[in-house]
Image (spheres, rainbow, N blue to C red):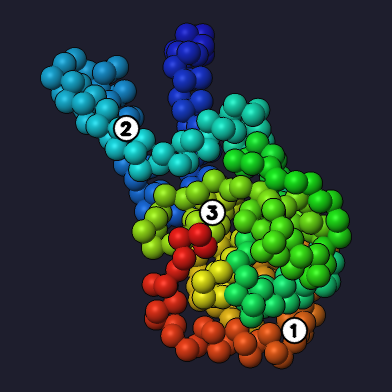
Amino acid sequence: MNFWGIINLKLLLDVLFAVGFGILLFSRVKEQRTLWLLRGYLFLVSSAWFIQRYSSLPLTSKLIDAVVLACSLSLAILWQGELRRLMELLGTGRLAVILGNPPKEFRAASTTITQLVDTAGRLSQNRRGALIVVDLGSDLRPEDFLYSGTKIEALLSTDLLINLFATDTPLHDGAVLVKGNKIISAGVILPLSRQGISRYGTRHLAALGITERFDRCICIVVSEETGTLSLANQGKLERPITSSRLQELLVNLIGNQNSKGTSKASLSKITISQTTSQNDSNINEKEPNKSEIFINKND
């Protein structure tokens, strides 16, 4: 008996492609609640396909099709940001990102964390607004931003970062892109997040927006109104934080990426100036519950 005569080759390929697509989706979803929604939706789609193919139940098929359509519209609204990101990746031909490309090796100098924390602390002390994007291997491109800003291509330094955020310069309102131990560009305009619109200002929404789209990307935010420090990672914002807490978070995040760089144990010994730490502690400890309220809409 011919083996291929028993098995429908077209049906077999259809099932294999569907299973492969489902595995790809499940591997890219990390949030548990989103995973539940995806499982339920795929179950409905599979049920509709099975009923339509192997049973003659026209009314049941119509009802399930209507439910699948309603769920599709609901998911399109809930996941509009993710779907937009998917279309952007397809449009730019970056299929490796969709397929889950391995993270590029992140190289940073041993002083990178010190310089970032010291800069944030001094800007917080002077209540000078700032937004620093740290690329940990997301392969950020100019088309990923609303405006790619001005190319800097300079070694990372505290003095240069502070000068870029000087209020009398044309670049201070945008973000600074940092990769490894280099400042790539300044005056970058980031896409805004739709979450917490009434709660956060522009800088915080921009930090949430870019970290929602890129997993291996973090943002340091300094509020211009209160001097409060914040850190955005994977679409979540931790605030208010002190300089010591910012240092701890950066050690964990950058230390995990920099596999060939300085170990976490040595990075944890990095210290910053006591004046900066004490000033940030005073700012964040005076009114921790009110720091979320008095936020300038330009922050």
**85 above or below 171?**
above
Residue at mark 3 to residue at mark 1: CA–CA distance? 27 Å
The numbered dot on residue 72 is 2
Question: Dot 2, crowdedness within 10 Å: few (<14), some or many (≥20)?
Answer: some
Question: Dot 1, crowdedness within 10 Å: few (<14), some or many (≥20)?
Answer: some
| Residue 293 placement: quadrant | bottom left
Question: Dot 3, crowdedness within 10 Å: few (<14), some or many (≥20)?
Answer: many
**Is label 3 in a helix, a strand or a loop?**
helix
Mark in the foreground, 1 or 2: 1
The numbered dot on residue 272 is 1
- Mark 2: amino acid: Ser
| Residue 168 placement: quadrant | bottom right
How many tags in the picture? 3
Q: Sequence-wise, which precedes: disc 1 or disc 2?
A: 2
Left or right position of 267 against 91:
right
- Mark 1: amino acid: Ile
Residue drawn at x 46%, y 28% is: 18
Mark in the foreground, 3 or 2: 3
Residue drawn at x 31%, y 42% is: 40
- The reply to whether residue 9 is in sight is yes
- Mark 3: amino acid: Ala
| Residue 124 placement: quadrant | bottom right
Q: Sequence-wise, which precedes: disc 3 or disc 2?
A: 2
Contact (Cβ within 8 Å) of mark 3 with mark 1: no
The numbered dot on residue 206 is 3
**Is label 2 in a helix, a strand or a loop?**
helix
**Is label 1 in a helix, a strand or a loop?**
loop
